[in-house]
Image (cartoon, grey):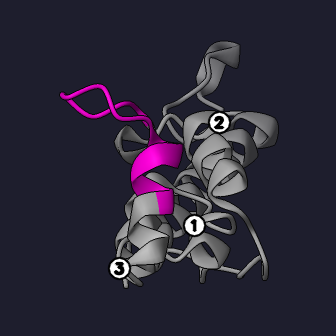
Amino acid sequence: MLAGGVRGAHDAPMDTLSLGLRGIVLGLVSATLMIASCGQQVPAVIRVEGASCAQACQHGRDLHCPFAEPTPNGATCETWCEEGRTKHTGMDTSCVAGIVTCEQSSRCVR
């Protein structure tokens, strides 16, 4: 403290300094967590064995996935899925029924 009771620049109360330090530490921790989460991979698909086309398509609609919407020709997801099953092509319904994100559906093509 300076003469006459006037505070100097370095005479800030301890609470103000500790709050500033806490803010800096909190900011650094938050930034580190954000950077670390950027490199995370998409979670693995957990298969739902025996899932039908209806179950896989409904799950896709619940996630708002484009594949679950009707085709430009009007074929439903269930229709083209069943046609693919008879030809052993198309989507793996056990895989699609277990996706967490629409992007994962690309892993479920036969």
**Residue at point 46% right, 46% down?**
79
> Sequence-wise, which precedes: disc 1 or disc 2?
2
**In this picture, residue 86 sits left or right of residue 54:** left
> Which secondary structure, mark 3?
loop
Q: Residues within 10 Å of mark 2 (few under 14, many from 20)?
A: few
**Residue at point 41% right, 61% down?**
83
x and y percentages locating residue 12 in the rendered image: 65, 34
Q: From this viewpoint, is residue 57 visible?
A: yes
43 up-or-down from 61: above or below:
below
Q: Residues within 10 Å of mark 1 (few under 14, many from 20)?
A: many
Q: In the rendered structure, which segment of residues is drawn in magenta?
A: 69-82
The answer to whether the residue labelled 3 contacts the one labelled 2, judged by CB atoms less than 8 Å apart, is: no
**Residue at point 35% right, 79% down?**
89
Q: Where is residue 25, by image quadrant?
A: bottom right
Q: Where is residue 33, by image quadrant?
A: bottom right
Amino acid at the residue labelled 1: Val
The answer to whether the residue labelled 1 contacts the one labelled 2, judged by CB atoms less than 8 Å apart, is: no
x and y percentages locating residue 98 in the rendered image: 69, 69
> Residue 56, which numbered label?
none
From the image, which quarter does the C terminus lie in?
bottom left
> Which secondary structure, mark 1?
helix
Residue farthest to the front, as pictured: 86
**In this picture, residue 71 sits left or right of residue 15:** left
From the image, which quarter does the N terminus lie in?
top right
x and y percentages locating residue 90 in the rendered image: 36, 71
Amino acid at the residue labelled 3: Thr
> Sequence-wise, which precedes: disc 3 or disc 2?
2
Q: Magenta segment: does it hold 66?
A: no
Residue under label 1: 96
38 and 8: which is toward the camera: 38
